[in-house]
Amino acid sequence: MGNGTPIGQVRGLGSAKEGAHHWWQQRLTAGANLVLMLWFVISVALLPAYDYATIAAWLSSPLAAVPLILLVGTVCYHIRLGLQVVIEDYQHDETRIVMIVLLNFFTIAIAVTALFSILKIALTSTPA
């Protein structure tokens, strides 16, 4: 488990030369996910009902749609960061690049699908 050169270790950089930046991104997205997930759980728990009409009316508010969009973005980015580390740590042959590209496509596809769904409901429903 080498971390590159001794000077790279002191600077917090591994062999990829971006260790500290990646580590901070993971911590920042984890903090954002914590705050946004708490908001989401509390917001959903306070809804009077859980039928489609109630959820659609709630989601038509910018106070619900915008944080939910932020939550999707930070969760998908956090997933990508974490799985990239797993791939880089355990995949050492030429398939590593292919796996990272597939990971990027997968997380982008999940994010776009979720964002489209949120925006479709938010922009076509009547406000509460």
Image (tube, rainbow, N blue to C red):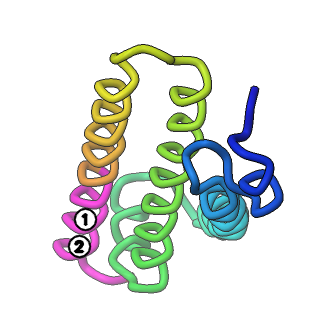
Identify the residue at horizontal 76%, vertical 56% (top origin).
Answer: 7
Q: Is 12 left, or right, of 111 in this rendering?
A: right
Range drawn in magenta: 114-127
- What amino acid is labelled 2 in the image? Ser
Q: Give the image location of residue 83, x and y in percent.
A: 53, 34
Residue 31 on the magenta span: no
Q: Is residue 104 visible?
A: yes
Q: Quarter of the image holding residue 125?
A: bottom left
Q: Give the image location of residue 104, x and y in percent.
A: 33, 42
Q: Quarter of the image holding residue 27?
A: bottom right
Q: Is 116 left, or right, of 18 in this rendering?
A: left
Element type at marker 2?
loop
Residue 117 on the magenta span: yes
Identify the residue at horizontal 47%, vertical 70% (top origin).
Answer: 70
Task: Check the image and report above or below for 104 versus 54.
Answer: above
Of 106 and 57, the residue lying toward us: 106
Q: Is 116 left, or right, of 62 in this rendering?
A: left
Residue position marked by numbered label 2 in the rendering: 125
Element type at marker 1?
helix
Q: Can you tell which mark lies on residue 121?
A: 1
- What amino acid is labelled 1 in the image? Ile
Which secondary structure class fits the magenta region best? helix
Of 5 and 62, the residue lying toward us: 5
Q: Are marks 2 and 1 in contact (CB under 8 Å)?
A: yes
Instruction: Name the quadrant of the N terminus.
Output: top right
